[in-house]
Amino acid sequence: VQLVESGGGLVQPGGSLRLTCAASGFTFSNYYISWHRQAPGKGREWVANISNTGGTANYALSVKDRFTISRDNTKNTAYLQMNNLKPDDTADYYCNVYFRTRNYWGPGTQVSVSS
């Protein structure tokens, strides 16, 4: 199983970024995918998840109505569209899959929101 995040960067408050999670090594369309983040000096927190078909998505209250999770099962890829970014969104962002009783994580992509 391999997950690789990309798309992070430095953005001003109010800006947008789209993160990408490229997956391999398992049948992507059979599994929920989630995004998590870890801010400097803090623990990792769940941000959003999406069902295997993409029909159901759930969000943490802190990002609801600003972030949108999606997936393309033909490309084995998940996305996190982040709009109206705030300085508190600054963190390393990770995608995750729970596969055969194990959690798998990518190496993460860094998002910095600052003026």
Image (cartoon, rainbow, N blue to C red):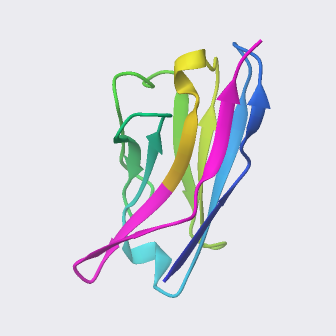
Quadrant of residue 15 in the image? top right
Q: Is residue 26 magenta?
A: no
Q: Residue at x 34, y 31 (%)?
A: 60
Q: From the image, which quarter does the C terminus lie in?
A: top right
Between 86 and 29, the residue placed more toward the observer is 86
Q: Picture coordinates of residue 2 (x, y %)?
A: 54, 79
Q: Picture coordinates of residue 44 (x, y %)?
A: 37, 44
Task: Identify whether 114 is placed above or below 75.
Answer: above
Between 38 and 75, the residue placed more toward the observer is 38
State whether the magenta stretch is mostly helix, strand or loop: strand
Q: Can the viewer see residue 54? A: yes
Q: Residue at x 48, y 83 (%)?
A: 1
Quadrant of residue 111 in the image? top right
Q: Residue at x 45, y 25 (%)?
A: 63
Segment colored magenta: 95-115
Quadrant of residue 4 in the image? bottom right
Q: Can the viewer see residue 66? A: no
